[in-house]
Image: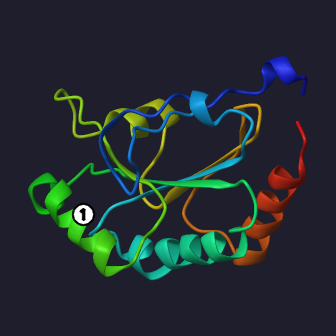
Amino acid sequence: MSENNVPKAPELAISEWFNTTAPITLAGLRGRPVYLHTFQLLCPGCLANALPQVQRIERIFSRTDLQIIGVHTVFELHDQMTPVILKGFIEEKKIRYPVGVDLADGKSDIPVTMERYGLRGTPSSVLIGRDGAIVHQLFGVEEDLIVGARIGVAVASGA
């Protein structure tokens, strides 16, 4: 596949950020690999598997320029997963990487970032290369070794 055929990651649509002093854009992160993970507070797979995995990724790749971004992508039970509750969760779980609240579009239960990426649900992850292209996208959780290998290649890539 030629470089021109690789899909670029759509920009994030975030209504509120946590763990960052300024809004984050993918355009502003160009040149760095990005591991984007989406979750919901009431998602059993997110709580049991995805979030602990992302914390392991954060620990293992802490000395690299990998940028981890969490996106709280609420597509159901909106009144039970508010930014106020999310803030308490982030503090309780000691999440240090930036977390954004996916922007609701007002027309659908599916928030904007989730729609832009065509995500089927949570947990989902998107690995974005230094050039802004989507390297890998997944609904669910992969084995740590596979995720680590994918991220390692993206981090090692000078492109």
Q: Percent x, y for residue 30?
A: 68, 32
Q: Residue at x 62, y 78 (%)?
A: 56
Establish if 64 lies above or below 22: below
Q: Residue at x 82, y 17 (%)?
A: 4
Q: Is residue 82 visible?
A: no
The quarter of the picture where the N terminus appears is top right
Establish if 145 lies above or below 8: below
Q: Quadrant of residue 32?
A: top right
Q: Residues within 10 Å of mark 1 (few under 14, many from 20)?
A: some
In this picture, residue 9 sits left or right of residue 48: right
Residue placed under numbered mark 1 in the picture: 86
Q: Nearest the camera: 31 or 150? A: 31
The quarter of the picture where the C terminus appears is top right
In this picture, residue 70 sits left or right of residue 79: right
Q: Residue at x 69, y 32 (%)?
A: 132
At mark 1, the secondary structure is helix
In this picture, residue 99 sits left or right of residue 104: right
Q: Nearest the camera: 109 or 97? A: 97
Q: Percent x, y for residue 158?
A: 90, 41
Q: Is residue 111 visible?
A: yes
Kind of residue at badge 1: Leu
Q: Percent x, y for residue 85?
A: 17, 65
Q: Percent x, y for residue 119?
A: 48, 44
Q: Residue at x 69, y 55 (%)?
A: 66
Q: Quadrant of residue 149?
A: bottom right
